[in-house]
Amino acid sequence: MIINILLGFTVIALPLTIGAVVRALWLRYRVTNRRISVTGGWQGRDRTDIIYSEIAQLRKVPRGIGLWGDIVVILKDGSRLELRAMPQFREIYDYIGEKVSAKTGKPLDSVKA
């Protein structure tokens, strides 16, 4: 986000900077021991809750220099939920993987891709 702010001083990168700042202000991820909760939309009115037993697979994508990244949660019905620009995404990815493995009874290697 700091890089986007620095590049935001140029006219070319200004719309990308505004988009990144708005997403950072409006989008909230909450990972608890029971569920993953995503709150966003206009003034936080949209909310999505995912319980660990509904998750079929997890994927991670590092961004930038690896300090933040995206986590893709694939549900049993085939739908996907993208958790974008998460700091400490490796630790969160491992935590979610352990919880899914414990709730579904699948081995950890089959949950994480």
Image (cartoon, rainbow, N blue to C red):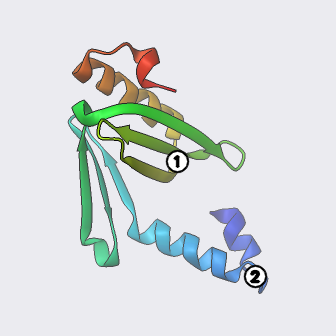
Side of 85 relative to 25 (left or right): right
The residue depicted at 77 percent of the width and 82 percent of the height is: 12
* The quarter of the displayed image where residue 60 is located: top right
* The quarter of the displayed image where residue 11 is located: bottom right
Q: Which residue is mark 1?
A: 87
Is residue 61 in sight in this rendering?
Answer: yes
Measure how far apart labels 2 and 1 are at the Cα level: 24 Å
Observer-nearest of 39 and 107:
107
Q: Which residue is mark 2?
A: 9
The residue depicted at 26 percent of the width and 40 percent of the height is: 32
Amino acid residing under circle 1: Pro
Observer-nearest of 72 and 2:
72
Residue 113, image x and y in percent? 52, 27
Label ID, residue 31: none
* The quarter of the displayed image where residue 104 is located: top left
Amino acid residing under circle 2: Phe
The residue depicted at 41 percent of the width and 31 percent of the height is: 57
Instruction: Estimate how packed mark 2 is, as few (under 14), some (14 to 19) or many (20 or more) residues with alpha carbons within 10 Å.
Output: few
Side of 72 relative to 14 (left or right): left
Which type of secondary structure does the marked residue at label 2 adopt? loop
Observer-nearest of 46 and 2:
46
Q: Is residue 49 above or below residue 17?
A: above
Q: Is residue 107 above or below residue 89?
A: above
Position of the N terminus by quadrant: bottom right
Residue 13, image x and y in percent? 73, 78
Is residue 33 in sight in this rendering?
Answer: no
Instruction: Estimate how packed mark 1 is, as few (under 14), some (14 to 19) or many (20 or more) residues with alpha carbons within 10 Å.
Output: few
Which type of secondary structure does the marked residue at label 1 adopt? strand
The residue depicted at 63 percent of the width and 42 percent of the height is: 62
Q: Residue furthest bottom?
A: 11
